[in-house]
Structures are given as C-alpha cells and as structure tokens.
C-alpha cells in the first residue's frame, strides 16, 4: 500500500465523522432534507407507497461534488 491510499482513507474517515457530527447536533434542523419540492411521493390506499427524493439526491450530489473538488484542489 502506498501513502496516497492512506491519505484518502483518512480523509474519508474525517468526512464521515464530520457528517455524523452535523447529523447528531443539527438533526432536528435538517428535517427539510428529503421533503424538498420535486421529490416524488405516491401513496396507495392502504398507506403503502413509493417515495423517491429526486431533488434531494441532486442537492446531495452537488454538495458532495463541491467537497470532492475542494479536497482535490487543496490536497491534490
């Protein structure tokens, strides 16, 4: 194994800790995440349904992409 792989593993671990801390401390303020306009929700008569958070997936993808670009710019 080389040192570059080790750096990436450490960065992924730090990112997971940071995300966990945000969810732990600000979880009640993030309840809008998953209920954005454009998220698809289809409910049946008996309460079961289909839920696909389209806009939430796009927002999360953009944020993760920005984080990856910043990490590569500073550490790459």
Image: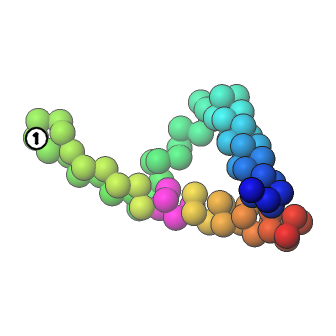
Q: Is residue 8 visible?
A: no
- How many numbered discs, if any? 1
Residue beneath the point at 66% across and 66% down: 65
Residue 14, placed above or below residue 41:
above
Q: In this view of the protein, which residue sits in the foreground, 66 or 9?
A: 9
Q: Within 10 Å of the Cα at label 1, are there few (<14), some (14-19), or many (20+) other Cα atoms?
A: few
Residue beneath the point at 45% across and 48% down: 35
Residue beneath the point at 87% across and 64% down: 75
Residue 25: x, y in percent?
70, 28
Q: Is residue 54 visible?
A: yes
Quarter holding the C terminus? bottom right
Q: In this view of the protein, which residue sits in the foreground, 16 or 59?
A: 16
Residue 4: name its quadrant.
bottom right
Determine the secondary structure under disc 1.
Answer: loop
Quarter holding the N terminus? bottom right
Q: Is residue 9 magenta?
A: no
Outermost residue toward the right?
74
Residue 58: x, y in percent?
52, 64
Provide the residue designation for mark 1. Answer: 45
Is most of the magenta stretch helix, strand or loop? helix
Horizontally, is 11 left or right of 60 in the view?
A: right
Residue 30, placed above or below residue 24:
below
Horizontally, is 9 left or right of 54 in the view?
A: right
Q: Which residues are magenta?
A: 55-59
Q: In this view of the protein, which residue sits in the foreground, 18 or 26?
A: 18
Residue 71: x, y in percent?
80, 63
Residue beneath the point at 49% across and 59% down: 57
């Amino acid at each position: 194994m080389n040192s570059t792989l080790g750096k990436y593993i450490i960065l992924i671990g730090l990112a997971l800790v940071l995300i966990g801390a945000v969810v732990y401390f600000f979880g009640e303020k993030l309840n809008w995440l998953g209920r954005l306009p454009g998220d698809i929700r289809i409910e049946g008569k008996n309460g079961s349904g289909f839920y696909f958070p389209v806009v939430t997936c796009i927002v999360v993808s953009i944020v993760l992409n920005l984080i990856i670009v910043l990490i590569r710019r500073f550490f790459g």
